[in-house]
Image (tube, rainbow, N blue to C red):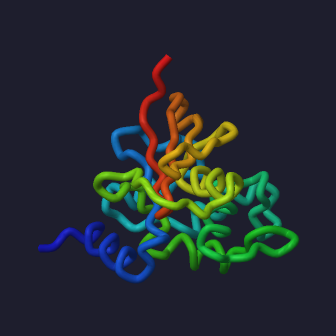
Amino acid sequence: MPNKSLAYLLLATLAAPSAVLAQDSTLPAAPDAATADSTTMAGTAPDCEGEFTTLDADANGYLSEAESPRDHARASVDGVAAGSDGLDRDQFLQLCNAPAWAEDTPEAGAPFEGANSFTEEQAQERAIAWNVTDVSALTKDDQGIWRGTGMVGGKAVSVAIDYKGNVVTTPATN
């Protein structure tokens, strides 16, 4: 039986190669409710309804950026505009159920050298969308790769965002 996650990755790559983002899978997923997508990584469908209810701390039917910065960043990367109250339930469920929503594996060989058209803010947003918190200021190196630091699962990481949108994290060195 074919690997379903691999099939989704291939489909997402073929449909929108620039939208495939990633995080080094050797690092643990962040443990907070905003990253409940780890169930998808284990091969089971995410409980999107339950996740929405958990994240909607004020129970107003919307996820504010303060309630879930990762989901707001991911929605923005995916071209979904949140309303003035935040992401509504239907927007969140549509995004959460998308095959690429929980993908966190970089393309082999990433980060890639190339002309990077992302602004620093867009690069930071991509890192946040892939579970990197406390993202530092980023600098674009001479290879066109945005580089900085952040946290994943409570551990310090170096982060690199390439021109394709891959987000690659590695354990930070002191």
Q: Position of residue 158 (x, y in %)?
A: 50, 34
Tell me residue 122's x, y (percent): 66, 59
The image shows residue 3 at horizontal and vertical percentages of 20, 68
Asked if 106 appears above or below 15 in the picture, the reply is above
| Residue at the farthest bottom position | 15
| Residue 112 horizontal/vertical position (percent) | 40, 54
Q: Where does the N terminus fall, quadrant-wise? A: bottom left
> Relative to the observer, which residue lies in front, 149 or 62?
149
Q: Is residue 160 left or right of residue 84?
A: left
* Outermost residue toward the right in this view: 84
Query: In screen coordinates, is 90 left or right of 156?
Result: right
Residue placed furthest toward the left? 1
Q: Left or right of 138: which side holds 3?
A: left
- At horizontal 73% and vertical 60% (from top left) the residue drawn is 56
Quarter assignment of residue 52: bottom right
Which residue reaches farthest front?
142
State the residue at coordinates (55%, 31%).
154
Which residue does the image show at 63% across and 42% down from the upper left?
A: 139
Considering only vertical position in the picture, is 54 above or below 100? above
Q: How many marks?
A: 0
Q: Nearer the viewer, residue 125 or 70?
A: 125
Q: Is 61 in front, or is 167?
A: 167
Query: Residue at coordinates 29% horizontally, 55% vertically from top-left?
Result: 108
